[in-house]
Image (cartoon, rainbow, N blue to C red):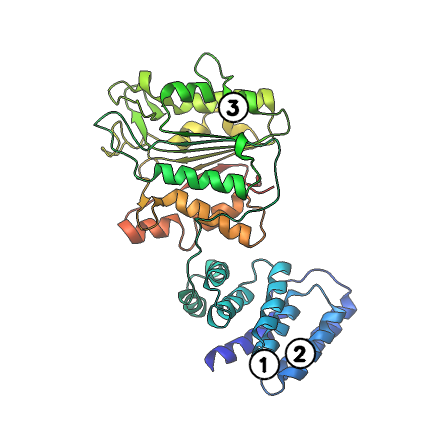
């Protein structure tokens, strides 16, 4: 009963709140009057309310609120599929429409047995107001999205290039394995291939890369023209670089490194790949080849000279990037899994690194919402309700705040 009352109140308020897309002013004024008449009929005469609201939509057909109200009228008649269709239309017209997202999530969870779709929509509502008890109650009815099987989309990016490196196993006994690195890299590769438009042959996938392989792919200190350079089509390619594995910081050299599987923590300068060199080579490649976009994703900790060792605040990959020429280029964005003084956690329950799991889950949410997967949208999810910080605090009672820099209009979807 309480939910019915709240939904009725929401309907009455919906036409008076967020701005609607522009339509003929006099027609929309008349539509608002018809909508008020329809809302008044919701409880006792929902079928008549449907007719009133349909008439209103015929006058002002771009109003998300009218479709939302029509969905409520169908809901009052227990016509849940029809209610779903109208509220989905409202969400397409206004993607952040929290009331519609919440009520639609409830319909999916309570009446249509689709708790994963409900989960996606409930998160839209809760992110807009994390303390709203009605939103939280709906969210509790849902089931988290299963991300292991990427949606298979037809869109392709014929000139896209990706580098995916998962370093799990290390030769040195002083460097522990990164338990889920291979699973993480495989998951990212599958999403790039099946959902983001990258062709399998244009994804360079390396497990347990050694320093020689990393030099061949990204170039070395003498020549930036490696495999990545050769694969990029000037002014056409979208580039994604994903690395998961250990990072480390050498306080003597004041340098952060990506650790190849053959790395020796006593000789990082000779056996590891400097982060500054990666940034410098990418900047040179970017300047010469002019790819449409470059997205760098690093799931690694850079907080000590020995993985798992003492925290070193100077080991800041974001600061290294900020001071590099790459950061000034307008076609670049970077995701780094944690701040320099934080661990990049695992999510053992899910069998993945925490950041990678939530990054891919966020991308999947956006795909399901027909979004283009912009860096800004990914950032909003990763840093919001039930994102990386919330999850790290819940699982480990510690901080992990992803660092996201660069051009946030870049999209991961075609």
Location of residue 243 in the rendering, given as x and y in whole percent from the top left corner = 41, 32
Q: Earlier in the sequence, mark 1 or mark 3?
A: 1
Which mark lies nearer to you, 2 or 3?
3
Quarter of the figure with residue 412: top right
* Badge 3 element: helix
Q: Earlier in the sequence, mark 2 or mark 1?
A: 2
User: Which of 343 and 359 lies nearest the eye of the viewer?
Assistant: 359
The structure residue drawn at horizontal position 48% and vertical position 20%, both measured from the top left corner, is 281
Q: Is residue 397 visible?
A: no
* Badge 1 element: loop
Does residue 162 appear to the left or right of 390 in the view shown?
right
Q: Is residue 407 above or below residue 284?
A: below
Residue that badge 2 annotates = 50
Location of residue 251 in the rendering, given as x and y in whole percent from the top left corner = 28, 23
Q: Is residue 337 above or below residue 107?
A: above
Q: Is residue 358 above or below residue 205?
A: below
Circles 2 and 1 in contact, beta carbons < 8 Å: yes
The structure residue drawn at horizontal position 67% and vertical position 62%, both measured from the top left corner, is 20
Q: Residue furthest top?
A: 222
* Badge 2 element: helix
Circle on res. 77: 1
Does residue 365 appear to the left or right of 210 in the view shown?
right
In whole angstroms, how far apart are the C-alphas of marks 2 and 3?
58 Å
Quarter of the figure with residue 201: top right
In whole angstroms, how far apart are the C-alphas of marks 1 and 3?
59 Å
Residue that badge 3 annotates = 228
Does residue 238 appear to the left or right of 276 in the view shown?
right
The structure residue drawn at horizontal position 71% and vertical position 78%, both measured from the top left corner, is 34
Q: Earlier in the sequence, mark 2 or mark 3?
A: 2
Residues packed near mark 3 inside 10 Å, few (<14), some (14 to 19) or many (20 plus): many
């Amino acid at each position: 009963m309480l939910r019915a009352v709240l939904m009725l109140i929401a309907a009455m308020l919906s036409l008076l709140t967020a701005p609607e897309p522009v339509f003929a002013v006099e027609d929309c004024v008349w539509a608002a009057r018809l909508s008020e008449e329809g809302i008044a009929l919701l409880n006792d005469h929902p079928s008549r309310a449907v007719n009133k609201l349909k008439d209103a939509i015929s006058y002002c057909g771009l109003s998300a609120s009218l479709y939302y109200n029509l969905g409520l009228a169908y809901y009052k008649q227990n016509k849940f599929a029809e209610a779903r269709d109208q509220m989905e239309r409202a969400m397409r017209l206004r993607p952040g429409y929290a009331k519609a997202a919440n009520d639609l999530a409830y319909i999916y969870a309570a009446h249509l047995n689709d708790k994963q779709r409900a989960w996606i929509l409930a998160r839209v509502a809760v992110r807009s107001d994390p303390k709203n008890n009605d939103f939280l109650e709906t969210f509790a009815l849902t089931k988290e999205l299963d991300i292991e099987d990427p949606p298979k989309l037809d869109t392709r990016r014929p000139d896209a290039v990706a580098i995916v490196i998962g370093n799990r196993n290390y030769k040195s006994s002083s460097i522990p394995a990164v338990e889920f690195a291979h699973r993480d890299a495989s998951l990212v590769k599958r999403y790039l291939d099946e959902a983001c438009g990258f062709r399998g042959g244009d994804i360079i996938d390396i497990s347990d890369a050694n320093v020689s392989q990393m030099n061949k792919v990204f170039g070395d200190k003498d020549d930036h023209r490696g495999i990545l350079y050769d694969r990029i089509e000037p002014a056409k390619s979208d580039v994604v670089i994903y690395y998961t594995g250990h990072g480390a910081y050498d306080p003597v050299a004041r340098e952060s490194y990506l650790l190849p599987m053959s790395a020796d923590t006593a000789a990082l300068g000779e056996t590891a790949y400097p982060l500054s060199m990666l940034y410098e080579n990418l900047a040179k490649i970017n300047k010469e080849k002019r790819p449409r976009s470059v997205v760098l994703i690093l799931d690694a900790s850079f907080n000590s000279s020995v993985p798992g060792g003492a925290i070193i605040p100077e080991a800041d990959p974001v600061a290294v990037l900020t001071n590099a020429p790459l950061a000034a280029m307008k076609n670049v964005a970077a995701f780094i899994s944690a701040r320099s003084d934080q661990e990049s956690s695992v999510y053992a329950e899910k069998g993945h690194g925490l950041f990678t799991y939530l990054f891919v889950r966020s991308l999947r949410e956006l795909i399901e919402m027909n979004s283009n997967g912009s860096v800004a949208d990914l950032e909003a999810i990763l840093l919001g309700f039930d994102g990386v910080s919330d999850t790290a605090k819940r699982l480990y009672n510690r901080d992990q705040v992803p660092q996201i820099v660069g051009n946030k209009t870049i999209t991961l979807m075609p």
